[in-house]
Image: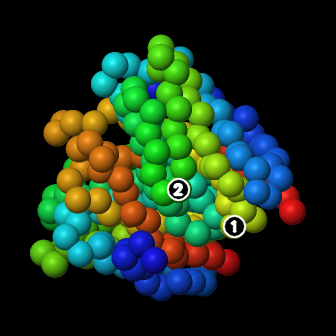
Amino acid sequence: DAKTTQPPSMDCAEGRAANLPCNHSTISGNEYVYWYRQIHSQGPQYIIHGLKNNETNEMASLIITEDRKSSTLILPHATLRDTAVYYCIVRVLGSSNTGKLIFGQGTTLQVKP
Amino acid sequence: DSGVTQTPKHLITATGQRVTLRCSPRSGDLSVYWYQQSLDQGLQFLIQYYNGEERAKGNILERFSAQQFPDLHSELNLSSLELGDSALYFCASSVIPGQGGNEQFFGPGTRLTVL
C-alpha cells in the first residue's frame, strides 16, 4: 500500500470548513483513498473513501486530484465535536487483499470556538 | 455506536500474567481485525480473521495469539505480559475483507495496563 503524508496538526474555527490535505504521490491505479478519524482514544471511525472521482456523504467530501497524487478531506461546517486525529490511508481492494488498515500519524484537527 | 463490542473496557494486571480480550463483531460481519495503539507506536495492525480462519498477520508478538470462533466472536490472548504491552487494543469488523466500499467498524477498545 502507498505511503501517505499529512500535516501533523491543523486548527479550524467552528462553523468554517476544515480542509485536511493528504499526499500520496506513489499511489497505484488500483489503490483507494480512505479517511478515518479517531476522537480522543475512541475507536477509529470511517469517514469516506474514493478512487478517482470526488465523493460526498453526510459527514464529509473527498476531493482527489486528477493525477491522484493528493487528496483533500473537507468537513463543510466544522464543530467542536470534529476535533480528532484524521487518518488518510491508501489501500488496494480486491479479493486477494486482506483489508487491513495501515495507519500513519494522521493530522490532529483542533476546532476552536 | 459501531455495533462492535469489546470486553473488558479496562484491564489492570501484573507483568508475567496472561489476559484474554474479547470482541463481538457487527451482525453479519465475517472478518475481525485486531489493532494495538500505544503512545509510541500509534495504531498498529496485529492480526485478522475471516470466517474463522487467520487471514493476515501484522506486527503481532509470538506471546500474543488470537482466534475466531464459529459464532464469529474473536479473542486476543496476551501472555507473559510486559510493561510495554500496556496499550489500547481495538477490534474492528467488516463484511468481506478487501472489497470496494468495505469499511471497517471499530469497537470502543480495551485499555490494558500492565504494572
Q: Chain of mark 1?
A: A
Q: Which residue is mark 1?
A: A81
* Horizontal side of residue B99 vs A43, given as left or right: left
Instruction: Tell me the residue at 68%/39% (across/down).
Output: A19
Residue furthest out toward the top: A67
Instruction: Tell me the residue at 50%/27% (across/down).
Output: A64
Task: Tell which of B85 and A18 is nearer to you.
Answer: A18
Please give the count of numbered marks on the rendered protein.
2
Q: Quadrant of the C terminus of chain B?
A: bottom right
x, y (%) of residue A92? Answer: 32, 32
Residue furthest out toward the right: A113
Asked whether residue A102 is in view, the answer is no
Mark 1 / mark 2, whichever is N-terminal: 2
x, y (%) of residue A88? Answer: 54, 40
Q: Which residue is mark 2?
A: A59
Q: Chain of mark 2?
A: A
Considering only vertical position in the picture, is A62 above or below A3? below
Task: Tell which of B45 and A36 is nearer to you.
Answer: A36
Considering only vertical position in the picture, is A1 above or below A55? above
Secondary element at tag 1: helix
Kind of residue indicated by mark 1: Arg
* Horizontal side of residue B83 vs A57, given as left or right: right
Instruction: Tell me the residue at 30%/72% (across/down).
Output: B25
Kind of residue indicated by mark 2: Met
x, y (%) of residue B12? Answer: 60, 84
* Horizontal side of residue A112 vs A83, given as left or right: right
Considering only vertical position in the picture, is B59 above or below B88? above
